[in-house]
Image (tube, helix red, strand yellow):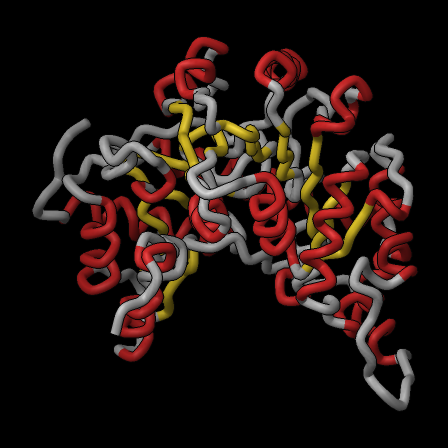
Amino acid sequence: MKFSNRVEGMASSPIRRLSGYAQTARDKGLKVIPLNIGQPDIETPQVFYDAISHFEVSVLEYTNSRGMKKTLETMQLYLRNYGLDFAIEELVITAGASEGLVFTMMTLLDEGDEVLTIEPFYPNYDTFAKMAGGRLVGVHSSIDNGFAMPSIADFEDKITDKTKAILLSSPGNPTGRVYTQAEIEQVIAIAIKHDLFIVADEVYREFNYTDRPFVSFGDYPEIAERVVLVDSISKKYSACGARIGSLASKNKEFMAHIMKLCQSRLSVSTLDQVGAGAMDLVDDQYVYDNRKIYKNRREVLNQALQKIKGVKVTEPEGAFYNIIQLPVDDAEKFIIWMLDQVEIDGYTVLATPAQAFYTDPRYGKNEIRLSYCVSEEMIERAMAILALALDRYPNRQEI
């Protein structure tokens, strides 16, 4: 049978598609250290569960398509604490940041339209653009200069009459870059000059390990009409399974179109919204403590990587990922081989091959993304396994 060209053109997730090999390792009795996925291991705040436990209704009804009042108010308060002032009608609750991004692509793109992003990027960006009939166009950044933001000329070289938006993640997944004020303002200048929307994926806002304050695209009133802020409770509150995200924009026409899509999916999960609405009770110390934990893990990971011969690495400034370059012929083949052939004390490692984080197939074949959402002990174990695997790998190729 024939399936749509749209779905045929989509790739499977590089973050999840090797899970079968990991399960095979588990079936052999090994413990797999999951450095492939950004699944926080820190406990979700108890107030989330308490709010759901105390939510007593006789019928679990649909909620408002925009979102429940309390959930919207909690997101509004959260953004206001960062100096970002949005009215309730400028917000919608989405089923995770992913739905927000899909709805944004569907609102901005016609068939064949393009969205610029900096590569390496979160691979689902490509899928989201394709779901809307569009195309993701990567502007290249390199590990050689710490994944610094590309130049204005590099951006403009990729802009066509089909370009509708720039999509950026800061702090970045997968590079960990936290863009500076000058870099943010460079993107703003490009967007104004070429009349583009800016879609700002800021779900890792809390995880900034630099001495610089985090700069949001929402901080600039002169571009308020062209900015869409994407957020989620998944990372900051360790609640990935709740699937609660949000969109914020002062562009009334954009938000009216978004509401059409929200209405088409009826509503976001009532119980998850109840839990998310209680997050205004979470003490700020929860976020501060978690940031310190991830920063320490980053340092443990980076120190271990720097001791492994042949690995090229930069220190991430935020989020909880890093892209590293390995002395191998093919990172995906290496990961599969490592899962099958290398273990220490009953442990092996799953990482994510990075080629799908680029639109240009020339890049990423010998790179992997590592997530440090596991304990420091597990990071140290994983790096010992990685070092042993690289030493034994039959297709090692020096960088």
Left or right, residue 239 beside residue 79: left
Asked where in the image residue 317 lies, by quadrant, the reply is: top right
Question: In the displayed structure, would residue 222 be above or below residue 364?
Answer: above
> Is residue 371 visible to us here?
no
The quadrant of the image that shows the C terminus is top left
Q: Residue at x 20, y 64 (%)?
A: 340
Q: Position of residue 137 (x, y in %)?
A: 41, 31
Asked where in the image residue 95 lies, by quadrant, the reply is: bottom right
Q: Position of residue 387 (x, y in %)?
A: 27, 44
Asked where in the image residue 301 lies, by quadrant, the reply is: top left
Q: Residue at x 82, y 80 (%)?
A: 61
Question: In the displayed structure, would residue 301 be above or below residue 27?
Answer: above
Left or right, residue 210 beside residue 5: right
Q: Position of residue 330 (x, y in %)?
A: 18, 43
11 or 235: nearer the viewer: 11
Q: Residue at x 89, y 90 (%)?
A: 58
